[in-house]
Amino acid sequence: KMVDPTLAEMGKNLNEAMKMLEDNQRKLEEENEKKYARKDIPGPLQGSGQDMVSILQLVQNLMHGEEEEETSQSYRLQNVGEQGHMALLGHSLAAYISVLDRERLRKLTTRILSDTTLWLCRLFRYENGSAYYHEDDREGLLKICRLVIHTRYEDYTIEGFNVLYIKQPVIYISSASRTGLGQALCNQLGLPLSCMCRVPCNTMFGSQHQMDVALLDRLIKDDVESGKLPLLLVANAGTPGAGHTDKLGRLKELCEQYNMWLHVEGVNLATLASGYVSSSVLAATKCDSMTLTLGSWLGLPAVPAVTLYRHEDPSLSLAAGLTSSQAVEKLRALPLWLSLQYLGHDGIVERIKHASQLSQRLLENLKNLDFIKTSVEDELSSPVVVFKFFWEYSNRDQTSQVAQASTIQHPIISNERHIYDTFNQWLGEQLAQLVPASGVDVVELEDEGTCVRFSPLMTAAVLGTEIQDVDQLVDCLKMKIPVLTSTLQLREEFEQEVRRTVGLLYIEDLSWPGLGVVRYNYHSDGKNDDKQEKELEKINTELLKKLNELESDLTFSLGPEFGGQKNCVYIGMVTEDLDVSELVETIAATGREIEENSRLLENMTEVIRKGIQEAQLQLQKANEERLLEEGLLRQIPVVGSVLNWFSPFQASPKGRTFNLTAGSLESTESTYVSKAQGTGTTPPPTPTSSLAKQRLPGQKIFKRSLRSSDGFSETSSVSQCDDLERMDQRPPTLSPGQERGPSETEKTEEQEELAQATTKDTEDIPSDKSPNDCTKVEEQESQR
């Protein structure tokens, strides 16, 4: 049977367009031309028009942009497969079908809408339901609210808001619901915020992310007694944060008691299509309405969300906007209709089952890891896995040394919450960067604080997550846990070392994921605040530069771009072999060196200026004395030359040299005598850490050898570092009965004779100069 040529051409054009848009390889010449093109600035519409290839090329450039500038961020597009192409084809077909005649359009849209609704109701076990397709996932709940208002207020169509004023409606939502959901509903419905009641979660029994049913019952009774009308309850089958499910069975009984509408939403509704469904989620099939987001669950781009509901009055559904008489509105289901047929029932179930297996695989591995605390609703089957790094003080005291356990002061509990939130924020960002295919993200929970969330139902189909990605995620987590524990343990020791060190100031920044923050204090000498601030910034910036030049595994930075302390050195994560005392001592010594150099450079200008003035005065005075010694006749040009020839004037050249180290003027007589410039005072040595001298060969700076490692013997009482140090410091000794051999005695005598000869030659150096040489030098100087 022949295919419609228009449909065949449409499919061909779509394949070509997708192939062009997905091709990220661009030539170097085109990139160089685009660097100077003003493509991001809107311009006038061209009169002659453009071909399809040029337009698609423009769309590709706007999609990908200058990718070489986006290397700092992880840039990853959705994995669009064949099923994604079907969804995109649906949008093109919807535009083509809309030009059909009215009768054909009505029959086609009715068939598409009825098929899609029937398939979804059977997939998710929702019998005798109707469907509303919408782009915004909150729009379905908004239409349901209008339907319930039309149902409970019979005169609402005629009286309008006056009916609501007489008996105020109340909508109940959980405190664990999406942020801003209640306010968005009130704004769209034109209701005051007093119509929205947030129900707290459990605090004593059950999950802390489930709605407190007993408290909800009391709230409803209070509203009924005050003359209000309980209208609708929004429950969660998978909260946005932790993925927990409310007690839908008890909530349904409570809604039937007070004649309320029960609406359910959440990611756990996807498990209704799988073979095994937990009883808590299965109770959602008895609710009055539910919202399904199939695009993220199945990895389908640009498909609408679906709200399934049960209602007997079609006129009220039409008044609420859940149904439409316009055939074009019914074409919203076309992309989903094509995609569901392409995947089939088995393909849909397999994708949801695969996501559940991924979460279960991660949960089993997390149970075997220390210092990882999970927050899941069901240990056997939990589509969402939430975990965090947590190190209890009991475990910390057991792993630490007994001597340190009595001295370390435990931080305040409030500070501990902030520190763990910061560390878990860093952990989540690291895992997302190392394993981007896992789709993990960071979530803020009210009770647990900052946690890492793994929700494969929302990300696996889009990112193409597999079992090996989960295993890689666990391996990365195993590598990060020792770093977190070491940093948390050494953080307190670092604070104590900094507070004991003169010249360093410990800055407490609970939002920094690392060892800590330190600042070198600049000792000002009566300077104003602005100048002192500049000097402080200069010294700490130079200190950061010096520390980064060291060959160490530590990370030194200026801290976060926003919200960090100024003029500080931020130290990142560390390992357990870090020598904190050496690190602090090196920071202090480097800071003192920079401060001394800064003060020397600061006073150098004034010292040099005074030295030049003093040198000029002394040279002028010496020149006058030389003229008096030579006499008047030697100053006459011809007579002076003849007189100097017959009777040379013996005078040593006099000059001045400025010693920058000592800051003083010195005579140049010693320079002319020895024919070499003296070094003067030896500058002070650069301050270094004394612990660096005990470093083993190949051992990096700030690293200490672990006594409990396998590299040391259990029966040895002296470490290898001590042995090396003692061997260097041990003088060569002889036993009582041992004597020097003949060869050693001869070598010793030869060395003594060589030393005496060297000393004699050194003393005879000034006497080797002849008077003629000195006369020639003096004559050349006088002519100059």
Image (cartoon, rainbow, N blue to C red):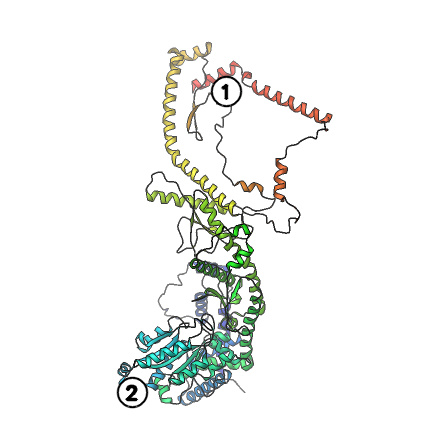
**In this figure, what is the number of numbered marks?**
2
Secondary structure type for disc 2:
loop
Q: CA distance from mark 1 to mark 2?
A: 118 Å
Residue 636 appears in view: no
Position of the N terminus by quadrant: bottom right
468 over 551 or under it: above or below? below
Amino acid at the residue labelled 1: Val
* Residue topped by disc 1: 673
Position of the C terminus by quadrant: top left
Q: Say which of 85 and 155 sits in front.
A: 155
439 over 509 or under it: above or below? below
Secondary structure type for disc 1:
helix
Q: Which mark is residue 155?
A: 2
Q: Say which of 544 and 68 sits in front.
A: 544
Report x, y in % for residue 137.
41, 76
Report x, y in % for residue 492.
48, 52
Mark 1 and mark 2 lie on one chain; the one further toward the N terminus is: 2
Using residue 443 as the reference point, say whether residue 706 is left or right of it: right
Q: Which mark is residue 301?
A: none
Q: Say which of 584 and 595 sits in front.
A: 584
Report x, y in % for residue 13.
49, 75
Residue 572 appears in view: yes
Amino acid at the residue labelled 2: Asp
